[in-house]
Amino acid sequence: MARQIDFDFSAPIWSDLDADWARFHKETPGVYRELLRLTRSRIHAQRLAGKEKPYVSIKSLFEEIRPRFPGLNNNYTSRYARHLMVSEPDLRGVFRTRGLRS
């Protein structure tokens, strides 16, 4: 059963955090590209190890790329996870998400 993605990135921005994330995402496109590359790499490694349904921790990816991207805010993890799953069909359901509170 596919996980539901509960944030519509095409909808108007509805919180200050969304606005901050959108600005950071636009100004720092390398973060998305690096998260995408690392996510696919981890999925590939898990499949090679025989894992049928891979799972990737967005928090661990953030810690890995943090030294290269000043201003990377932990509050952006859920936005990037959702954005990756919406934008990249092969990544749907690879991150565990909960409902957004802010």
Image (spheres, rainbow, N blue to C red):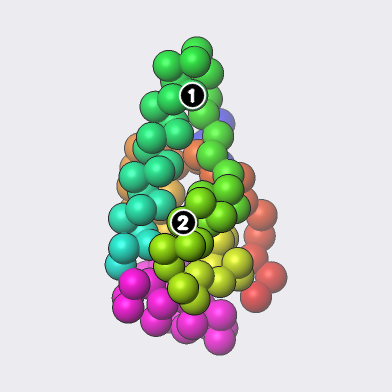
Question: Residue at horizontal 58%, vertical 48%?
Answer: 60
Which residue is tagged 2?
Answer: 65
Give the distance between the C-alpha atoms of the residues marked 1 and 2, in whole angstroms: 20 Å
Can residue 82 be seen? Answer: no
From the viewer's perspective, tell me whether residue 28 is left or right of residue 4.
left
Q: Nearer the viewer, mark 1 or mark 2?
A: 2
| Mark 1 lies on residue | 46
Q: Is residue 76 left or right of residue 8?
A: right
Mark 1: few/some/many CA within 10 Å (<14, 14-19, 20+): some
Residue 55: x, y in percent? 55, 34
Residue at 54% in and 68% down: 76
Question: For the residue labelled by badge 2, is the local secondary structure a helix, a strand or a loop?
Answer: helix
Q: Are marks 1 and 2 in contact (CB under 8 Å)?
A: no
Q: Position of residue 15 (x, y in %)?
A: 56, 83
Numbered range of the magenta stretch: 6-28
Residue type, numbered disc 1? Gln
Q: Position of residue 54 (x, y in %)?
A: 52, 29
| Magenta residue check for 82 | no
**Which residue ends up furthest to the front in the rendered image?**
67
